[in-house]
Image (cartoon, grey):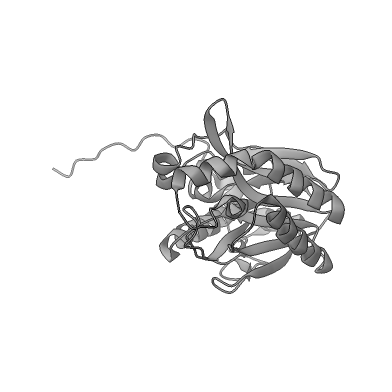
Amino acid sequence: MNGMLRLALAQYAIVPLAGVADFAASLDSLAGEAVAGGAELLVLPEYASVAAAADPAGSCDVTAELDRACAASAALLDAMRAVARRHRLWLLPGSLPARMGGITRNHAPLIAPDGRMAMQEKRVMTRFEHESWKISPGAPPSVFETPWGNLGIAICYDVEFPALVRAQVAAGAWLILVPCCTDTIAGFNRVRLAARARALENQCFVALAPTVGEAPWSAALDCNRGYAAVFGPVDRGFPEDGVLARGALDQPGLVYATLDPARLDAVRAEGAVRNHRDWPAEVPVAPVVSLA
């Protein structure tokens, strides 16, 4: 493990894009900005690249937009890998839908500076994904080896389920990356509060990167609310609210944080509480108690 990680989180503005080349140019610009800010890992939101597949005429056809996004998936991944190689940057360029054998899944690539790539699929679908896009649940959570140790990825809604993140932490992940896309403040708050809870209960870092902005020409990304943030344990050596960094609501830009996994080792050993260690191995079904 190579010590501290300089992280950049994109509050990614959804704007009209004329295809894959436009998205690649946008990503390249963000990567250059992130590197100039000292970042070693850049994170974009869930479905950030879907804007490249939206209908510029603004027809907002849900099925057609998904079909175009899936058709562009391979080209988008090639562009993402090229940006990571060009800037010598670790990159989580958001998530994107992909279709194989008639099955559509939402997956997020983690790309190394030399272009090597691994995928985390979204495990639990939202109602829009299940009912409108017919996206299927993906593989169980994985952890990914990096120079800074093992990292996990929980795509948006997945972070709302403690068992998914706990499985990653139990496998050694000290940082959970959460690319997210929410169209209301309530939706963003569900993800935000869940991320804070996961950081508290696992004594780990959790980092959010959201889409922002209005895009009435897109069926899937018509409204985007939120801000980037990094949460940590609520204990000794950390802010009293557990918030290490946060951006301005709904404003495009990058939010930076420098994270040291050694701080987690210290709080897990010497904190006022030991949530990470005290996690119950198995909780039996609660009995029904009669007051009669």
- x then y, percent, for residue 5: 78, 58
Q: Please determine whether, in this image, residue 157 is positioned above or below residue 11.
A: above
Please report the residue visible at 48 percent of the width from the left and 58 percent of the height from the top: 58
- State the image quarter where residue 231 is shown: bottom right
Count up the numbered dots: 0
- Name the one closer to the observer, 245 or 35: 35
Answer above or below: position of 280 versus 94.
Answer: above
Q: Position of residue 276 (x, y in %)?
A: 60, 48
Residue lying furthest left: 292
Residue in the picture at 51% in, 60% down: 192
Q: Residue furthest front?
A: 57
How far from the left and from the top, in percent, is residue 141? 60, 37
Q: Is residue 67 visible?
A: yes
Task: Return the x and y of residue 235 as percentages of the image width and height.
Answer: 61, 64
| Left or right: 133 as drawn, with respect to 237 | left
Camera-nearest residue between 212 and 244:
212
Observer-nearest of 94 and 165: 94
Q: Quadrant of residue 262?
A: bottom right
- Which residue does the image show at 56% across and 55% down from the upper left? 180
Q: Camera-side residue: 57 or 224?
A: 57
At a point 53% along the width and 30% down the height, the residue shown is 103
Q: Is residue 274 visible?
A: no
Q: Quadrant of the C terminus?
A: top left
Q: Is residue 187 left or right of residue 9?
A: left
Q: Is residue 113 left or right of residue 27?
A: right
